[in-house]
Image (tube, rainbow, N blue to C red):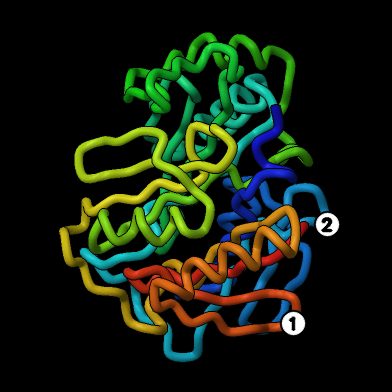
Amino acid sequence: MNFHKEPLIYTGEVHLNVTDLEKSVNYYKEVIGFKVLEEEANKAVLTADGKTPLLILDQPENVTPKEPHRSGLYHFALLLPERADLGAIIKHFIQHNVRLGASDHLVSEALYLSDPDGNGIEIYIDRDPSVWHWEDGKVAMSTDPLDGESIIAESAGRLWDGLPAGTVMGHVHLHVAHLPETETFYNALGFEVVTTYPQALFMSNGKYHHHLGLNTWNGVGASRPSEDSAGLRSFTLIYPTETVLKEALAKVEALGTTAESFGNEKLIEDPSGNRIVLRVGN
C-alpha cells in the first residue's frame, strides 16, 4: 500500500531556514542527492523527480544559528523506493566519509545525519506492511542495530546517482513543548497515535507506522525558536479532498487555532509554534 497518496493525509515538502544558502544547496545536492528545481537570491527549491518540491531552503536576511533546546524540527525523513537504493546511498556516504547513525525500527531501516545547520535528516526504506506487527491498534517499533552489510549486498552493481525519482517525504519528526495538547491538536488534523516511546508519540493516518513523530526530548515546555533562527520554517500536510481539509480546519479552529489563507493553502501553527501548510492534492 502507498501511504503517501490519496485517500490518506500525508506529509509534503519541508521548508527550512539556513544560515548559508550556497553551502546548504551544495550539501543537499552533493551529499543527499537532490536536484535544484528553482533558485533565487535567498531561496532554493529542491526535488528528487525534477518536478515535485520536497525541500525548500530559505536564508532570511537576519538569520541566526539554530537555537538549542527549542521546539521545531527533530528530523525530516526521506523515504526511498527500494532497499537497494538505501544500499547505494550507504556506499555513497562511506565514499564521502559522511558521519551516520543507523537503526532497524522493525517497520523500517533508517540512516540518520545532520545538515550544515544541524537540521536532522533521516533516509529510510519501509519493510513490507505485511510484516509490521499490530496489537490493540499500536504498531511494534524498536531501535535495533541496522544490518548494513545485507543492505549494501542488495545494492550490488547499483551506483548512487542522486535521490531516486520515487523518493517522498516519508514523515516529519518534531520537538514539541507538551505531548497531551500536541496529541489533541494533530488528532483534530486527522492523525491517531500508533505507538509511543518515552517522551514521544508517533501518529499516522491510514495505519502507516508514522507520518508524524512528536517528542519533548528538548524539554517539557520548550519554547519556540526565534523567527529568523535556522531550522524549521514550516512543513506541509496534504489532504485528499477539500471536504476532508475543511473538516480538519474546523476541528483545529475549535481548539483556538487561527488559519491564514495563501491562495489554495492554509497556514496554521501547532501548540508549540511549528508552522504547518495545509493543502489538497500535490
Query: Element under label 1?
Result: loop
Which residue is at the far bottom? 61
**Does residue 15 lie above or below 180 as drawn?**
below
**Nearest to N terminus: mark 1 or mark 2:** 2
For the residue pair 224 and 242, the one nearer the viewer reads as 242
Instruction: Identify residue for label 2.
Output: 51
User: In which quadrant is the N terminus drawn?
Assistant: top right
**Residue 176: % across, % down:** 30, 60
Q: Quadrant of residue 231?
A: bottom left
Instruction: Identify residue for label 1.
Output: 263
Q: Residue at x 49, y 48 (%)?
A: 191
Q: Residue at x 56, y 73 (%)?
A: 21
Q: Quadrant of residue 119?
A: bottom left
Disc 1 versus disc 2: nearer the observer:
1
Which residue is at the far left? 220
From the viewer's perspective, tell me whether residue 102 is left or right of residue 36: left
**Residue 184: % across, % down:** 36, 57
For the residue pair 17 and 277, the one nearer the viewer reads as 277
Q: Amino acid at mark 2?
A: Lys
**Does residue 82 lie above or below 181 as drawn?**
above
From the viewer's perspective, tell me whether residue 139 is left or right of residue 178: right
Q: Residue at x 40, y 59 (%)?
A: 73
**Residue 222: % across, % down:** 20, 67
Which residue is at the far right? 51
For the residue pair 204 and 110, the one nearer the viewer reads as 204
Within 10 Å of disc 2 (Cα), the crowding (few <14, some 14-19, many 20+) is few
Within 10 Å of disc 1 (Cα), the crowding (few <14, some 14-19, many 20+) is few
Residue 216: numbered disc? none
